[in-house]
Image: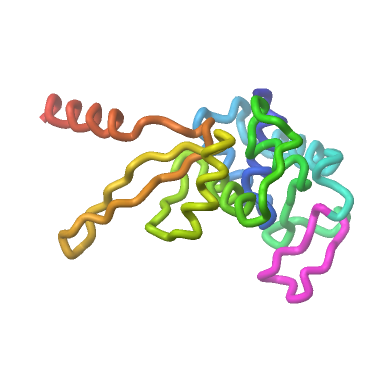
């Protein structure tokens, strides 16, 4: 992926809430695999100009953050940007980013399933933990059937000492087997100490 595709991908993964410009810089700095360009002022200006000219991100896709605008009014690009400006990808771009290039772009999902997919996508490598909820099971089932998400068993130790068993949901492109990773880290820890 080239640098501008990575930027658009990060914006699209944020979903309908969008991303502020300062948050985008943080996302790009912390990105795994690393962002290929150095994020200096010149690069940030270049990225901003490319965002402003992207068809999937313009025409009322820049909107004022709800925290600073009670009416959620649309604003134009000419307004000074900062923490009050949120960049939101178009619906079609968000959908293409979430389903990946290998799936059918004509795929039909219920609104609820799409919201779950968008939430899982926003989690990126951390994914989304699903506790035992029957409604979520049915929404998740259609996403797994279309191979849009993967599931992993996830066990978390609570402060009380009990274990909570959950399911970790991830987009297919962010999937990696955490149990193998955990065993590897444990092995390295005991080997080093």
Q: Is residue 175 left or right of residue 122?
A: left
| Magenta residue check for 64 | yes
| Quadrant in which residue 179 is drawn | top left
Colour scheme shown: rainbow
Q: Is residue 78 left or right of residue 169?
A: right
> Which residues, given as a range, are shown in magenta?
61-76
Name which quarter of the figure residue 65 lies in: bottom right
> From the viewer's perspective, is 186 left or right of 167?
left
Find the residue positioned furthest to the bottom.
Answer: 70
Instruction: State the residue in front, 153 or 27.
Output: 153
Most foreground residue, 56 or 7? 56
Give the prevailing secondary structure in the magenta stretch.
loop
Magenta segment includes 77: no
Depicted 94 relative to depicted 193: above or below:
below
Q: Quadrant of the N terminus?
A: top right
Instruction: Name which residue lies at 50% across and 59% down.
Output: 135
Report the label total.
0
Q: Position of residue 189 (x, y in %)?
A: 17, 31
Quadrant in which the C terminus appears:
top left
| Res 182 seen here | yes
Q: Is residue 18 visible?
A: no
Residue under the point 38% across and 57% down? 131
Q: Residue at x 34, y 51 (%)?
A: 166
Q: Is residue 80 above or below residue 174?
A: below
Residue 29 in percent (x, y) is at: 55, 38
- Where residue 47 appears, as percent x and y from the top left, is 74, 37
Q: Is residue 79 left or right of residue 133?
A: right
* Residue plotted at (52% across, 41% down): 124
Q: Position of residue 134 (x, y in %)?
A: 45, 59
């Amino acid at each position: 992926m080239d640098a501008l595709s990575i930027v658009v991908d990060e914006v699209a993964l944020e979903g309908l809430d969008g991303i502020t410009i300062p948050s985008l810089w943080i996302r790009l700095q912390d990105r795994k695999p690393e962002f290929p360009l150095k994020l200096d002022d010149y690069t940030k200006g270049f990225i901003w100009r490319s965002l402003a000219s992207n068809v999937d991100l313009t025409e009322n896709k820049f909107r004022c953050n709800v925290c600073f605008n009670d009416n959620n009014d649309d604003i134009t690009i000419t307004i000074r940007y900062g923490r009050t400006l949120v960049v939101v990808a178009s619906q079609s771009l968000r959908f293409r980013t979430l389903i990946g290039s290998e799936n059918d772009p004509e795929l039909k999902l219920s609104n609820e399933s799409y919201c779950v997919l968008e939430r899982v996508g926003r989690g990126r490598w951390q994914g989304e933990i699903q506790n035992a909820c029957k409604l979520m099971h049915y929404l998740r089932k259609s996403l797994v059937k279309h191979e849009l998400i993967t599931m992993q068993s996830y066990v978390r130790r609570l402060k009380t000492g009990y274990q909570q068993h959950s399911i970790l949901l991830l987009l297919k492109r962010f999937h990696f087997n955490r149990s193998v990773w955990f065993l590897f880290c444990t092995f390295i820890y005991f080997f080093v100490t």
